[in-house]
Image (cartoon, rainbow, N blue to C red):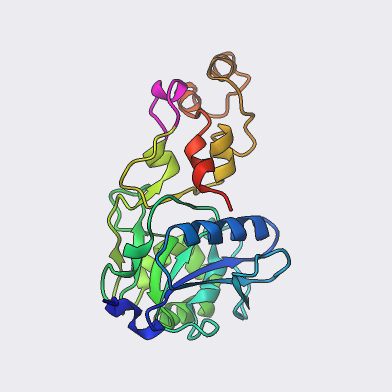
């Protein structure tokens, strides 16, 4: 029986992503497609809105980046170019689309993301880093094509003012989506640093865990799946043994923050990331 959420798309689960510049590109797009393919019940489509189609596997439906005639905010942490996807149309897509960031890891079925809620809902992953704020996460969220036109119009009117007020695009979406937002179950979408890495001192003895509830693991703030696989808390950190890192922090060679904070910033290589984050 087809979910009512999929009626507008003829029963097809529609996945979308966005790519611009050179930070991610084809390796991330192709891995994301492969993870989707392994974790979804067909039929589905995978559409990437991008400024460069070179090297992208043929199964990916490529569309040009939607036009948005504004100057993007500067000195803002939010990923505001995602606002390109909030327009009245998205290529040939109709109905609900599930947006996925390029640097997340899919570890289980995506099917339930298309049965939760109602067809007209904007449904977001819950932001785990702000437990006392009702805030969504735009690393993964579902919306009907065209539903977010009002917030795109508000953003276009004064992009820098919006960014200054909300800081992150996910806060802007959460607070301004027409009709409000709903949230997927908290344990479906997990934050790698918050939900998977071990607390001190277990982080020196055990690799980050993968809770059974997880469907998707997100990697915000500069920590990419490759870094976790190699055993690096930060992209520029050198992967090393627990004993070497511990002594480097104690002696000050690896001191970036407080002593305790830096001691917590060690992770062992996370091999389950490599099991899932692959073509």
Residues shaded magenta:
197-207
Judge left or right: residue 177 versus residue 100.
left
The image quadrant that residue 170 belongs to is bottom left
User: Main SS type for the magenta part?
Assistant: loop
Q: Does residue 130 sit above or below 70 in this rendering?
A: above
Q: As rendered, which of 137 and 93 lies closer to the eye?
A: 93
Q: Residue at x 44, y 42 (%)?
A: 192
Q: Which quadrant is the N terminus positioned in?
A: bottom left
Q: Is residue 158 visible?
A: no
Number of numbered discs on residues: 0
Q: Is residue 198 magenta?
A: yes
Q: As rendered, which of 188 and 71 lies closer to the eye?
A: 188
The percent position of residue 214, horizontal first and vertical second, equals 35, 48
Q: Residue at x 43, y 81 (%)?
A: 145
Q: As rendered, which of 47 and 99 lies closer to the eye?
A: 47
Q: Residue at x 65, y 55 (%)?
A: 27
In this view, which residue lies farthest toward the right?
A: 54
The percent position of residue 268, horizontal first and vertical second, equals 51, 28
The percent position of residue 188, horizontal first and vertical second, equals 33, 53
The percent position of residue 137, horizontal first and vertical second, equals 40, 58
Q: As rendered, which of 278 and 238 lies closer to the eye?
A: 278
Q: Is residue 249 magenta?
A: no
Q: Residue at x 67, y 65 (%)?
A: 56
Q: Is residue 3 visible?
A: yes
Q: Does residue 15 sit above or below 28 in this rendering?
A: below
The image quadrant that residue 95 belongs to is bottom left
């Amino acid at each position: 029986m087809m979910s009512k959420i999929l009626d507008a798309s003829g029963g097809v689960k529609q996945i979308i992503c966005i790519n611009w510049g050179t930070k991610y590109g084809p390796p991330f797009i192709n891995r994301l497609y492969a993870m989707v393919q392994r974790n979804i019940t067909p039929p589905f489509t995978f559409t990437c809105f991008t400024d460069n189609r070179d090297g992208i596997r043929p199964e990916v439906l490529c569309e040009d980046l939607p036009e948005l005639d504004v100057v993007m905010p500067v000195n803002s942490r939010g990923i505001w170019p995602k606002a390109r996807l909030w327009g009245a149309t998205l290529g040939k897509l109709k109905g609900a689309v599930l947006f996925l960031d390029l640097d997340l890891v899919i570890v289980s079925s995506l099917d339930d993301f298309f049965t939760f809620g109602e067809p007209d809902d904007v449904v977001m992953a819950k932001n785990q880093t702000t437990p006392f704020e009702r805030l969504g996460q735009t690393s993964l969220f579902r919306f009907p094509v065209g539903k977010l036109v009002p917030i795109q119009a508000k953003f276009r009117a004064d992009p820098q003012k919006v960014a200054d007020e909300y800081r992150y695009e996910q806060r802007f979406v959460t607070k301004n989506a027409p009709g409000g937002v709903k949230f997927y179950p908290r344990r479906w979408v997990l934050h790698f640093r918050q939900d998977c890495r071990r607390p001190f001192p277990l982080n020196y003895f055990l690799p980050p865990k993968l809770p059974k509830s997880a469907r998707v693991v997100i990697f915000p703030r500069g920590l990419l799946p490759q870094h976790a696989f190699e055993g690096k808390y930060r992209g520029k950190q050198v992967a090393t043994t627990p004993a070497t890192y511990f002594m480097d922090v104690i002696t000050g060679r690896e001191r970036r923050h407080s002593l305790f904070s830096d001691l917590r910033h060690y992770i062992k290589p996370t091999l389950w990331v490599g099991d899932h984050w692959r073509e």
